[in-house]
């Protein structure tokens, strides 16, 4: 363990083996850093905050602060950040609210670039990349392996499906199906994230079937329910397509991002 003499580590903070706390960092009494966490310098971590092993936190980052929510009355809430996360300069991630379940949860292997903000009660999956100055509103759920381009804004309560790609500057106000690509203000689907799917080794036939299912789901005169049933009938054996259909059917009260 290495703690710079200018750092403040309050009594009660838990630090694992090999933790490095750089100059002018401040750790509150309920902070828990697992093995191998590195705080470069000028990092503030407050509240009941847990950071997974091997994560690297860069200067002027603020983690575990109280939620920016008018209904928050000082309740005990939590922030959990997974292992091997890379959090760059000026990132802020807040704890949850009692009304929202009390926990903001960040998965393993994420990369959060300069100026990213993740609000209260968000659930972020594994291997998510948020480019500079992405703003994520409260109660947002982002599944695994999503890439969000710089300067994007994601409205509270939105869901972003796994393997999705959002182009820079987009404003997301509705739920985005897995494996899709979106751009614009307000963001609209422009097809599937074919490049990302190929990079992850997805079979050509799977991609071909997913393209056909996408067209079927977002075009035609039939109702959405009828189109869902048609896609399930023709492509229901595909795990990837089943994931899309389960996402669409999960919460009928939420608006679904339309296709261009």
Image (cartoon, rainbow, N blue to C red):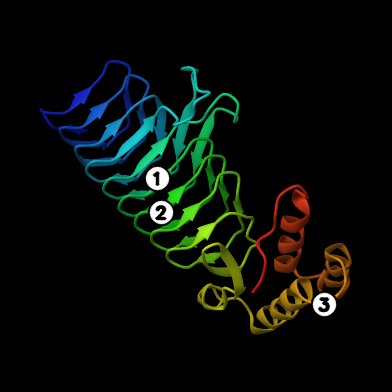
Q: Against 157, is 14 above or below?
A: above
Task: Tell whether label 1 touches label 2 (CB within 8 Å).
Answer: yes
In the displayed structure, 102 sits above or below 148; it is above
Question: Disc 3 to disc 2, how far (Cα)?
Answer: 34 Å
Q: Identify the secondary structure beneath mark 1.
A: strand
Q: Which residue is identified by label 2?
A: 134
Percent from the top left, x then y, of residue 107?
49, 46
Q: Distance between the residues labelled 2 and 1?
A: 6 Å
Give the mark toward the camera: 1 or 3.
Answer: 3
Q: Mark 3 points at which residue?
A: 220
Q: Of marks 2 and 1, which one's residue comes earlier in the chain?
A: 1
- Residue at horizontal 26 percent and vertical 19 percent from the top: 10
Q: Mark 1 points at which residue?
A: 117
Which residue is farthest front? 185
The answer to whether residue 180 is visible is no
Residue 115 appears in the figure:
yes
Q: Distance between the residues labelled 1 and 3?
A: 39 Å
Mark 3 or mark 2: whose residue is earlier in sequence: 2
Up the image or down, 36 lies above or below 219; here it is: above
Residue at (50% x, 44% y) in the render: 137
Considering only order in the chain, which callout, 3 or 1, is on the residue closer to the N terminus?
Answer: 1
């Amino acid at each position: 363990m290495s703690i710079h003499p200018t750092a403040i580590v309050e009594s009660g903070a838990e630090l694992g083996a090999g933790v490095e706390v750089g100059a002018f960092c401040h750790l509150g009494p309920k902070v828990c850093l697992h093995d191998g966490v590195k705080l470069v310098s000028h990092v503030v971590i407050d509240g009941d905050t847990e950071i997974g092993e091997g994560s690297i936190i860069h200067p002027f980052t603020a983690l575990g602060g109280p939620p920016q929510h008018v209904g928050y009355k000082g309740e005990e809430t939590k922030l959990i950040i997974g292992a091997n996360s890379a959090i760059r300069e000026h990132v802020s991630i807040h704890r949850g609210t009692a009304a929202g379940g009390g926990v903001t949860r960040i998965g393993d292997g994420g990369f959060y670039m300069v100026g990213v903000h993740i609000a209260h009660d968000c659930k972020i999956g594994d291997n998510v990349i948020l480019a500079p100055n992405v703003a994520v509103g409260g109660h947002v759920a982002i599944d695994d392996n999503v890439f969000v381009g710089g300067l994007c804004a994601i409205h509270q309560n939105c869901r972003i499906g796994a393997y999705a790609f959002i182009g820079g500057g987009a404003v997301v106000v509705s739920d985005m199906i897995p494996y899709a690509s979106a751009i614009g203000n307000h963001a609209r689907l422009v097809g599937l994230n074919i490049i990302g799917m190929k990079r992850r080794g997805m079979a050509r036939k799977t991609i071909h079937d997913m393209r056909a299912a996408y067209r079927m789901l977002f075009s035609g005169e039939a109702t959405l329910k009828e189109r869902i049933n048609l896609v399930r009938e023709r492509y229901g054996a595909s795990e990837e397509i089943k994931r899309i259909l389960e996402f669409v059917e999960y919460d009928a009260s939420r608006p679904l991002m339309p296709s261009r």
